[in-house]
Amino acid sequence: MTANAAGADSDADLHELLASRQVGVVATIKRDGRPQLSNVSYTYDPATRTIRVSITDSRAKTANLRRDPRVSVLAASANGWSYVVAEGVAILTPVATDPNDATVDELISVYRAIGGEHPDWDDYRRAMVADGRLVLTIPVDRVYGLVR
């Protein structure tokens, strides 16, 4: 399922690269069909092949995903020569509306996977509601790229 100009990289190598990074580019499809790209922090679970991202309800990528849930994530090595693209269909949680709702609990899980513990979880919970945050989950259907 993975290919490049030099031949095929193993899915395992590509999934390993995806799991080793925490910053990538999310590509969604704008209304006019062109890609809309956003830098994001993400977490990837190779056991379930699932990417999770904290996103804001008011942003273009969220509107694009509601209209067309096809999504890709690009992650690259530190030197940029190795890369992986993960493709899937987006699943969006409801927008956080209460500091103790299930979406905020999921946002905490995403935060912990990316950055560890927060110094003030009560403040974080309030901020997630104030920001209108939700979780983008991407079950990865396909990967391709180049691992050098």
Image (cartoon, rainbow, N blue to C red):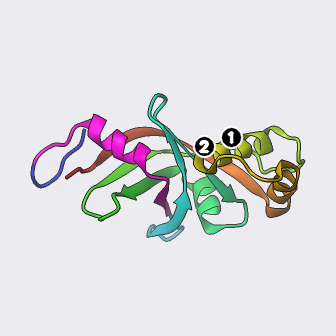
| 66 left or right, relative to 37 | right
| 108 left or right, relative to 69 | right
Q: Secondary structure at mark 1?
A: helix
| 29 left or right, relative to 57 | left
Kind of residue indicated by mark 1: Ser
**x then y, percent, for residue 144:** 28, 47
Viewer-proximal residue among 56 and 117 = 117
Location of residue 80 with respect to 17 vertically, above or below: below
- Give the residue pinned by disc 2: 113
| Residue drawn at point x = 77 percent, y = 43 percent | 103
Q: Residues within 10 Å of mark 1 (few under 14, many from 20)?
A: some
Location of residue 108 with respect to 81 vertically, above or below: above
Quadrant location of the N terminus in the rendered image:
top left
- The circle drawn on residue 88 is none
- Give the residue pinned by disc 1: 109
| 58 left or right, relative to 147 | right
**x then y, percent, for residue 19:** 43, 43
Q: Is residue 10 magenta?
A: yes
- Residue farthest top in this picture: 47
Viewer-proximal residue among 2 and 108 = 108
Magenta region: which residues?
7-28
Kind of residue indicated by mark 2: Ala
Q: Secondary structure at mark 2?
A: helix
| Residue drawn at point x = 51 percent, y = 66 percent | 39
The residues tagged by marks 2 and 1 sit, at their Cα atoms, a distance apart of 6 Å
Task: Mark 2 and mark 1 in contact? Answer it, CB < 8 Å.
Answer: yes
| Residue drawn at point x = 31 percent, y = 43 percent | 14
| Residue drawn at point x = 66 percent, y = 67 percent | 59
